[in-house]
Amino acid sequence: MSRILYFMYTGQIRVTEVTVCQLLPAATMFQVPNVIDACCAFLERQLDPTNAIGIAHFAEQHGCVELQKKANVFIERNFTQVCQEEEFLQLSAYQLIALIRRDELNVQEEREVYNAVLKWVKYDEDNRHCKMEHILGAVRCQFLTPNFLKEQMKNCDVLRKVPACREYLAKIFKDLTLHKCPGVKERTPNTTRMIFVAGGFFRHSLDILEAYNVDDKTWTTLPNLRIPRSGLGAAFLKGKFYAVGGRNNNIGSSYDSDWVDRYSAVSETWRPCAPMSVPRHRVGVAVMDELMYAVGGSAGMEYHNTVEYYDPELDRWTLVQPMHAKRLGVGVVVVNRLLYAIGGFDGNERLGSVECYHPENNEWSFLPPLQTGRSGAGVAAINQYIYVVGGFDGTRQLATVERYDTENDTWDMVAPIQIARSALSLTPLDGKLYAIGGFDGNNFLSIVEVYDPRTNTWTKGTPLKSGRSGHASAVIYQPACSTTFMDYEESDATQPEGGNDEGRHGNTPQNPCGGGSPHYPGTASNMQFHTSFGQSGCNNCDTEIDIKPEIPPERHSFQIPAIKSEELTNPSCPWAKMQERFRRTAPRPFSPQREGSPLDAPIAHKFDKARKTCILSTAAKVFHNHIEGRLRKLTSAST
């Protein structure tokens, strides 16, 4: 309590990992908002996967709503790391259910949530397996793959003890194999959403990779493809962006490619994957059951009806049943675990036929055809509807848009796109369709149009930096600089084989904070991490923290009423646990004070390798009499 009094007299207070757990309850008890704010600011800067759950609970206990909200957002965005920590395993069943029910959990696949639940149960299996049935209802098992469900029902020891869980998963397995609508919505992580656009053609094949940030509506150039390519396919699978096939059409060189490259948005590097069985130009690509399918395409004048899928865990391609028709420039999409191949060119005519692949039976079946045969159309799905936009009918580029209802097996027309085009890409995001680039018969387009199915209208979007056709696009969720724990994969930050080392597109990861940030060394040979947790004073991270010289430590030593000194050393005490977590937290780098920092800044932090401190400067002496009176009453009441 002496620190509160010291603050009243001097207007300064030091917050450390040792004192914060005493100061915040005391400041809350005596209603000293400036000290509360300083403690919350300090705890916010310490957020880490090892302590985020504890900080969220601590904030809830003391009514710190904003800190609790920020801790919860951190947990959601870094669930993959948080669920590996001891705090997660100590959650109650009620707390666990509340956490995994959140739509905003940032997971690449629902399997991560299921495995986290299984890990939680096995931590104390004798007492927790009986709660599995209720917890499993909060997992969106409808987005697990049938093969994974089958493996779990067969081999999982926990499920053997809870027959009701096996029955529940068996019903979901049956619904998935019957291709029923899931009935639950997918998670929507609260992270930056981006559309990646790769390759394309403008006088020659391009090696461009650009990213569109839907939040600030801007395009950003990323490291180039390993080889120029047009007529490629693209997909986002297990946290990586894949560029598949295509043609390298340049002066003195023109060949179709079987190459497949994988891009990591974290390390900003490309790596080669196993090649396809054949080269595929103007190939269709889609993801189903955590496998990436490559459909049709061509190798020179040979048109393909073959189909193969890529397993990223095995780095291997496997052929499946071929389509009935050869299809170049085919549009492919997945709805309810069915793969649709729409339109294309077979070497003789533009096709209106539509085929559907059933993975359980490994067979293709025909569906009602398009009203207008076309190749090079943009194809994408929103909910139960498949949209086919533009394309080429053999005579001209099309502006018409057809929509297929997968539930009712019918086609209808919706609002046409404003500019007729073919060889475009079509990407769904946030319930809208983004029609990007293409060729209008005379010009390569940079124009982006956005379709809203609720209003059945097209509007202009932010154009590409340059016109192109024959490119490919996919949506990814990009981790944010200041709010996401960036866990680098084991070797992506080092020089990969076949990497791109031209200028700014080299294999050294880009500094997410921009030039001059002390958080991220400009050059390094080893793996680099960029986090903002516990760091202070980065001029490029929108921080409000200013660095000031460290003041001498206070000499006073009082304890908060009702918290005895022996309790603080008791391992079971929540304050002792919190202090221990902070001691395990790695030291963070710091930057010098920015020039022009206000002398009366309400909060100032100083971090070094020895301890992290927070200095609060304000004219708070006016509260002294009020607090001193409360202390006298509390002392007299206790005696």
Image (cartoon, rainbow, N blue to C red):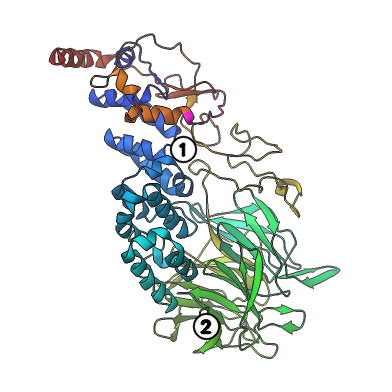
Whole-number angstrom distance, CA of label 1 to CA of label 2? 47 Å
Which residue type does callout 2 highlight?
A: Asn
Q: Residues within 10 Å of mark 1 (few under 14, many from 20)?
A: many
* Magenta-colored stretch includes residue 560: no
Image x and y of residue 523, in percent: 70, 37
As rendered, which of 182 and 530 lies closer to the eye? 182
As rendered, which of 578 and 107 lies closer to the eye? 578
Image quarter (top left, top right, bottom left or bottom right) of the N terminus: top left
Whether residue 625 appears in this view of the structure is yes
Disc number placed over residue 48 in the picture, else none: 1
**Residue 446 in which image quadrant:** bottom right
Image x and y of residue 367, in percent: 50, 88
Q: Say what secondary structure mark 2 lies in.
A: loop
Residue bearing mark 2:
361
Image quarter (top left, top right, bottom left or bottom right) of the C terminus: top left
The residue range painted magenta reads 584-600
Q: Say what secondary structure mark 1 lies in.
A: loop
As drawn, is 252 to the left or to the right of 206?
A: right
Q: Residues within 10 Å of mark 2 (few under 14, many from 20)?
A: few
Q: Is residue 257 above or below residue 525?
A: below
* Residue at image coords 45%, 32%: 46
